[in-house]
Amino acid sequence: MTFDYIVQQLINGISIGSIYALIALGYTMVYGIIKLINFAHGDVFFVGAYTGYFAAKAGLGLILSLVLAMVVCGVLGVIIERLAYKPLRNAARIVILITAIGVSFLLENLGITFLGPQAQGFPEIVKKTDFTLFGGVVIDSIQIIVLVVTVILMAVLQYIVHRTKIGKAMRAVSYDMEAARLMGINVDSTISATFAIGSALAGAAGVVFAVMYPSVDPLMGIIPGLKAFIAAVLGGIGIIPGALVGGLLLGVVETGVQSIPGMSLWRDGVAFGILILILIFKPTGLFGKNVREKV
Amino acid sequence: MNKRFFLGVAISLVFYGVIQALITGEVLNDSYVDTLVIMGVNIILAVSLNLINGFTGQFSIGHAGFMSIGAYVSAILTTNEGYSFPLALLCGCLAAAVAGLIIGLPTLRLKGDYLAIATLGFGEIIRIVWLNNDYVGGASGLNGIERVTDWTWTFFLVLITVVVIQNIVKSSHGRALIAIRENEIAAESMGVNVTRYKVIAFVVGAFFAGMAGAISAHYFYGIAPNSFNFMKSFEILVFVVLGGLGSTTGVIVGTILLTLLFTYLQDFPEVRMIIYSLILILTMIFRPKGLLGSVDVSKFFTKKGGASKDGGTTTTP
C-alpha cells in the first residue's frame, strides 16, 4: 500500500463516484419534491446510454451525443411523470412506489424486446490516452472527461436551482407544496421540470458510463441505479450537495474495498452495509437535519 | 366465528381433495402441479409479507432475504447433514425468524421510506453473504437437493400459514398491529407496546417467508443466490399490493391471478414482462387499493348474518 497506490485508487473512485453523483441528483431532486423513490431512474440512465450509443454510431461526437441523450431522457422523464405519477399525486406512498417499480420493469423489458438482451460494444468516440501525474499515478482521458462533465453539469444545476425562477419554484414546492400553490406557483409544471432536469442528468451519466465501460445493455441501469440511490441516502435524500458528496464517497469506498485482494466480490455488500449503518445511526443522511415530528 | 373458521377449513380441505384426486387421476399433469406449488409458495410469501406491510403498516421490501435463509438452512440440513425434511423445515423457519429479529430490532426505529430502503439493503446483504460463501456453493448455489415437497406438503403449509396469520390478525394482537398502522403515536398513547408488536410482526413474517423458501428449495432441486435478489422481493410486494394491502383474501386472489398470468404468458417470453408491468402500472393508477381493496371474504358472511337478523327484528313487532 504505497502512497501512489492510494492516490490511484482515489482517482478511480472519484471518477466512478461522480457518475453515481450524477444519477443520485435525479433521485434526490425527485424525492425532495414529491417524496417518491423513483425506481425507474436507473432505467432512464440506460435509455441515456443507448441514445448515446446510437448517436455515436451515427457519427456524432461526444458533446452532441451527450446533449442528445440529455434531451431524450429529459423528455422521457416528463412523459413518465405525466402518465404514471401525476394521476397518483394524492395516492398512498406505497402505490406510487409500486408504480415506479412497474415503470422500471416496463422500460427494462421494452429495452430487452426491442434492443435485444445482449450487451453491445460502445463505439470509441474518445481516444483513451494515459497521462502520468507523478510516480505511478495514471489518469486517463476518459476519467478526465467524466470529471469535467460532472463539474460542468453540477455548476449548471447549482445555477438553475439557486439563480433562476424555476429553481426558486422547485425549492418552494419541495419546502411546502400547498403553500407554493397558494403563492401562484404552477406545481405540476414545476414537478415536470424537476423530472426533466433529473432525468437529463441521468442521461448524461448514462453516456459517460458507457464511454468509460464501453458497452451498453438494457439491464445496465439496475446496479448503478441502486448505488446512486444509496449515495443519495448517504448524503441525505432530498439535499442536492448531499448527493454529490454521497456519490463521491461511495465511489471512493467501493474502489477501496475492491482494491483489497480477496474482497472484490464484497463490493456491493459494503455499499449496502454503509446504507444500513447510515440509516441506523443517522437516517437523514450526512447532511440531513432532524425534523421534529408534530403530533 | 368458530363455525366460520371450521367452515373455511372444511371448504379448503374439499378443494385439496378435489385437486389431489385430479392429480392422482392424471387429469392434471406435472406442469400443473408445478404451477400449483409455485402458487402455494407465492401465497405463503404474500400472506406473510401482508402481515408486515398490510396490517402493521411497516414498509418492508426485503422479504426475499428471509426466504433465502429458510431455503439455504433447510437445504443444507437435509443435503449435507442428513436431517429429515420436517425438522429441517422447522430449523429453516426458525433461522429466518431469528434473522427477522436481528434485522427487526435496529431497523424498526426507522419509518416509511427509510425502513423500506433498510430492509432492501438487508435483503441484498443476505444474498451477497450466500454469494460469497463457498460452503453453500457461491454463485452457482446448492444443487442436488432431494425433492421432498409436493402438492400435499404445499397445501397444508399454506393452510397453516393462512390460519395462523388470520388468527393473529383477528386477535387482540392483530388489533394492536392495525392500531400501529393507523396511527403509531395514538397506538402508543393507548398503551400498545409499539416496538414489541412491530418486532413480532417482523419475526412471524420472516418465519413464514423461511417456510416458503424451504418448500421451493425442496421442490425445484436447487437454489441459487440470484433468485433471491431484490426483484424477488418486489415481486412479493406486487402480489400484496395488487391483491389489496391488509386483506388476506385479496392477497390470495391477487397472487393466484398473477401466478396464473405468469404461467400462461410463458409461451410469449418477450411480451410477458411488458404485459406484467403494464398491468402493474394500470392497476395502481385505476385501482390503487388493489383488486379487492381491504375486503375480506369473511365479512360477506357477517353482513349476510346481520341482514337476516335485521329482517327478523322488523317482522316480529
Image: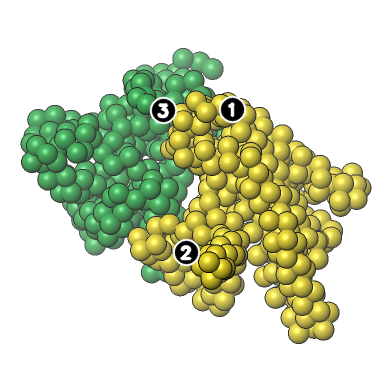
Report if residue B215 is visible in the image. Answer: no
**Mark 1 Cα within 10 Å, few/some/many (few <14, many 20+)?**
some
Up/down of A95 relative to B174, above or below: below
Determine whether label 3 and label 2 are within 8 Å by CB.
Answer: no
Determine whether label 3 and label 1 are within 8 Å by CB.
Answer: no
From the image, state whether disc 3 or disc 2 is nearer to you. Answer: 2
* Element assignment for label 2: loop
Residue underneath mark 1: B193
Q: What residue type is labelled 2?
A: Leu
Can you give x and y, in whole percent of width and height, for residue B220 in the image?
74, 61
Q: Which colour represents chain A? A: green
Can you give x and y, in whole percent of width and height, for residue B307 in the image?
53, 66
Residue underneath mark 3: A234
Question: Residue at 45% of width from left, 55% of height from top?
Answer: A219
* Element assignment for label 3: helix
Residue underneath mark 2: B291
- Identify the subunit bearing mark 3: A
Question: Residue at 71% of width from left, 40% of height from top?
Answer: B96
Determine whether label 2 and label 1 are within 8 Å by CB.
Answer: no
